[in-house]
Image (spheres, coloured by chain):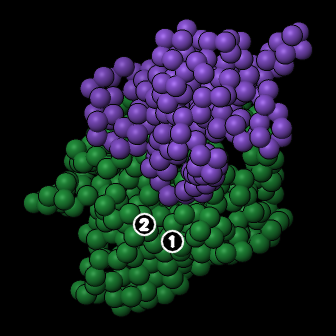
Amino acid sequence: MVKRRASKVFVFVLGLAPLVALLWRAYHDRLTANPIEYITHYTGDWTLRFIIFTLFITPLRKVLGQPGLIRYRRMIGLFAFFYACLHFLTYLVIDKFFDWKEILTDIGKRTYITVGFTGFVMLAALAVTSTAGWIRRLGGKRWQLLHRLIYLAVVAGVVHYYWSVKSDVRQPVFYGVLAALLLAYRWKIGTFARPRVSTPVVSRAPETVAR
Amino acid sequence: MLIRKSPDVRYSEVTPKSLYLNRRKFLAGVPGAVLAGNELLSPSGRASAATTKLQTVQSALSTTGERINPKEYVTGYNNYYEFGTGKDEPQQLARNFKTYPWIVTVEGECAKPRKFTIDEILKLAPLEERVYRHRCVEAWSIVVPWIGYSLSTLLNQVEPNPKAKFVAFETLYDPKQMLSPLQAGIPLPYVEGLRLDEAMHPLALLTVGMYGETLPPQDGAPVRMVLPWKYGFKSIKSIVKIRLVGGQPASTWNLYAPNEYGFYSNVNPNRDHPRWSQKTERRLGEFGRRTTLMFNGYGDQVASLYKGMDLIRNY
Ligand code: HEM
């Protein structure tokens, strides 16, 4: 039990590391001549990376024979949402400074923002319903169905990235390939064909998962 | 730390405080400092990253009432895709870019086509210091004290003939020193173009320096254009060829995405980029956004060039 808790604390600290690194750079005045752009890109990158990390859990459980890895998935997913919040707040507060007219125009008119915002709403829905209470309320099957939104969220993240760059698409393409492989794996194991109900989704309250 | 206030001093008074920003940049600056006071080194020994001091005269065409950005903003934050697509990459990757000797070929529809060495260009006319606002298509802006003279001075040397209607520019493309088009994400060599009347406009600055010195490689050394009423990408860097032509020449970003980047690319807050708004901009070093001005605030001088033109369609 203690060891488990310690490993979770370890993953938690790892999840905060990118933020600490960002604050470190900020403190040392190393955010380039355009700090707002730097922070937007930095937090966007880490949002996408954490979404990818959550998608790695299932294949790694199988490949490494470590089903216990599931216990970190919720935390990693919440970190994706955490960085998405920083990313969105950077845009909202620092970049546009609550210029709602501009923001709504952006969300409605600029496809890359529309797609990013859709991804953000999906991550928010997943974060809110990530608790044991919500699993109970929704029932395991419906909860699992809802949480497949992560597959759409990663697609939204990649498309958002791809459309946001001016010409050098190597990075978004790299994440796109990773996402495609991870989704192809789900296809192969039949995730899309039938709801998986046997996996314990939450480590702390597995008894709440309907079977 | 997010909010970095520009010091309210002229750039010449800015101490190299921000040099710690980047140790390598500091080291790159050392040979410059040494060279400035050391005439013993031959010109070919002029390491590319090193800049030398330039004598300048004042210019009536210099923009007043603007706070000049500290030099570090202009040397550490660049769009020069031949040296990387990240803003901080050109400073590193262009470090050893060989900018001397350098020859600019001026040819095409003119009576006296010829080649100019960079030394000839530096001596063709008194070098003026011109402070200009510089507005990037990515919605950020800076204020830079460029050094050069009107491009018309150079063009008049070759005597354009009546068939010359446009001017085509080309950047050096040297795969040994630069990234591949695939890595840069755009076709290379980088090309740009102007209508002849735009090119002959006194504000169109043939630029050889900034901040009292020759250009650092990442800012387009040894010679580039600066067109303050147009988006930054029109201001082509490291020029090797200038051609007077009859038809509208190709321009790199227009080739890459014609619906996003037009031939004219005048700064225009009323014509959004399809993917982002051009109504406002971030002046580097400032927290809030500023409203973007038509022709980047140079309308009084240049609007007459576009009389009767629909600038939404001719973006
Ligand atoms: C699932 C949610 C999201 C993900 C995964 C995500 C990810 C990213 C990534 C990876 C980048 C590019 C970073 C880089 O260039 O290195 C980016 C850029 C950006 N994102 Fe997001 N983002 C999301 C949501 C949003 C939302 C909701 C907004 C605002 C409404 C937003 C606004 C931006 C902006 C303004 C940029 C900068 C584009 C540029 O400067 O070219 N993103 N995002």
Residue B42: name its quadrant.
Answer: bottom right
Mark 1: give few (<14), some (14-19) or many (20+) Cα within 10 Å.
Answer: some
**Could you tell whether B113 is left or right of B122 in the image?**
left
Q: Residue at x 47, y 47 (%)?
A: A159
Mark 2 Cα shell of 10 Å, populated few (<14), some (14-19), many (≥20): some
Q: How many numbered marks appear?
A: 2
Q: Toward the viewer: B219 or B178?
A: B178
The answer to whether mark 1 and mark 2 are in CB contact below 8 A is: yes
- Please identify the residue farthest to the bottom as the structure is shown: B111
- Closer to the camera in the image, B303 or B200: B303
Mark 1 element type: loop
Residue tagged 1: B187
Q: Is residue A78 above or below residue B177?
A: above
Q: Which chain is home to disc 1?
A: B
* Label 1 within 8 A of ligand 1 by Cβ: no
Report x, y in % for residue A102: 30, 30
Q: Which chain is purple?
A: A
Q: Which disc is residue B256 wearing?
A: 2
Considering the image in quadrants, where does the C terminus of chain B appear? Answer: bottom left
